[in-house]
Image (cartoon, rainbow, N blue to C red):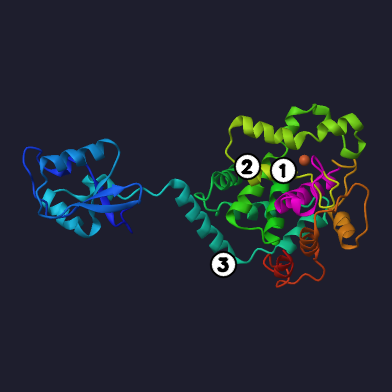
Amino acid sequence: MSEGKEYFVIDKKFLGDPNTEPLFPFHLYVYNPASQQYSTYLHANSPLIKDKRVFLEQIIDKGGKVAVSMKQKRTFLVHGDVKEEDIEDLVEEPVHELVLKREKMLKELEQKQAEGKFHFKKEFKEATTKKSGSFQVLIDQARLEIQTLSVTRSHTVSLAVYLAEHLLVEDNFINRVVAFSYHLAKSCGMDDDQAIGDIVCAAYLSHLGQTQVDFEYSHIPQLKMNGLQQKEFRKHPALSQHLIRKSGLLISERCNQLIVQHHERFDGNGYPDKKKGDHIEPLALVLGAASHILEFQTGRVTGTEVSMRAIINCFKNDAPMTGLEVEFGKVIYDNLLNMFEDENLSEAEGSSSDTEETKQAA
Ligand SMILES: [Fe+2]
């Protein structure tokens, strides 16, 4: 894009007839990669003598840049009888389709917000009050918001946008984990584009390693595994990381760490490395909390399905339930309590942005 540029690069053919020593009504500049600046090489109305032309041609042949100031663009175009579209460096770069798609999603989100604010607590209560409650609204909201992340931020963020668009559609277990992780991270104030990109990708990829352990292990409730089964099952975070590295998939190092650490717990009783407290990535604890609560609810931990309301009451009343892990650190625990706080829910209280108090704890 020419907007904001001080110089535009020109091709050899614009250096005039090689058999003459032409005069140009504009200065010629040469780019210096060491200083990353353009410096004047030939002043306007000075003849381009043979030695100087050879030097300029060598620079261009070796990938260097010869340029004209944007202030003399019109003079250059008139002198050479050329149009802007004839100069490659003056042609506007087309806007990438992913950037256009993001702009569309931003407008869609803006329009949705204008129609009525999304109330996380209200929707979460709806989703968890009945046994057959649907997470679809929470998933749809997460999908829309994730699609507004900057696709030029990093590989991981653009992968998160892609996964949200193509996978975060129906109400299934993995999409519940992704949506719950997303809303919890946001509630905890860990909501910059990179953080959300990291946790979304990690939520989708953290159990890839389960495809490499005995099929039986993914079907035995975690508390009913014998020692050997548990040992094998607990390899899944490292196996997920191994598969991702082997595949060459580009994800950030933090996303990698979220995958490896999603079973680490704040008190040091997690696995695989028994990391403790601040040695654990906070987003790994967010993913760990969201995925564990949903695993517990669906019976993957104890073998018995439990209602989400029972889990919520357990958190609220600080009443332990066998197999239910709560060691996610104070910030995440407080934000979980805040998300679960739905008594006497009013329009104002239900706003997803009313978590400032707990955010500040972060
Ligand atoms: Fe896991």
Q: Which residues are magenta?
A: 271-299
At a point 78% along the width and 51% down the height, the residue shown is 289
User: Does the magenta-highlighted stretch encompass residue 286?
Assistant: yes
Mark 3, residue position: 114
At a point 79% along the width and 41% down the height, the residue shown is 273
Q: Nearer the viewer, residue 116 or 94?
A: 94
Residue 334 place in picture, x, y as percent: 79, 63
Q: Label 1 is placed on what type of residue?
A: Ile
Mark 2 Cα-neighbour bin, 10 Å: few <14, some 14–19, many ≥20: few
Is disc 1 in contact with disc 3, using a CB cutoff of under 8 Å? no
Q: Earlier in the sequence, mark 2 or mark 3?
A: 3
Horizontal side, residue 153 vs residue 60: left or right: right
User: Which label was assigned to residue 167?
Assistant: 2
In terms of secondary structure, where does tag 3 sit? Answer: helix
Residue 52 place in picture, x, y as percent: 15, 43
Image quarter (top left, top right, bottom left or bottom right) of the C terminus: bottom right
Residue at mark 2 to residue at mark 1: CA–CA distance: 10 Å
Q: Nearer the viewer, residue 282 or 297?
A: 282
User: Which label was assigned to residue 12?
Assistant: none
Identify the image quadrant of residue 222: top right
Residue at mark 2 to residue at mark 3: CA–CA distance: 26 Å
| In the image, residue 315 above or below residue 209 | below
Identify the image quadrant of residue 13: top left
In terms of secondary structure, where does tag 2 sit? Answer: loop
Horizontal side, residue 73 vs residue 143: left or right: left
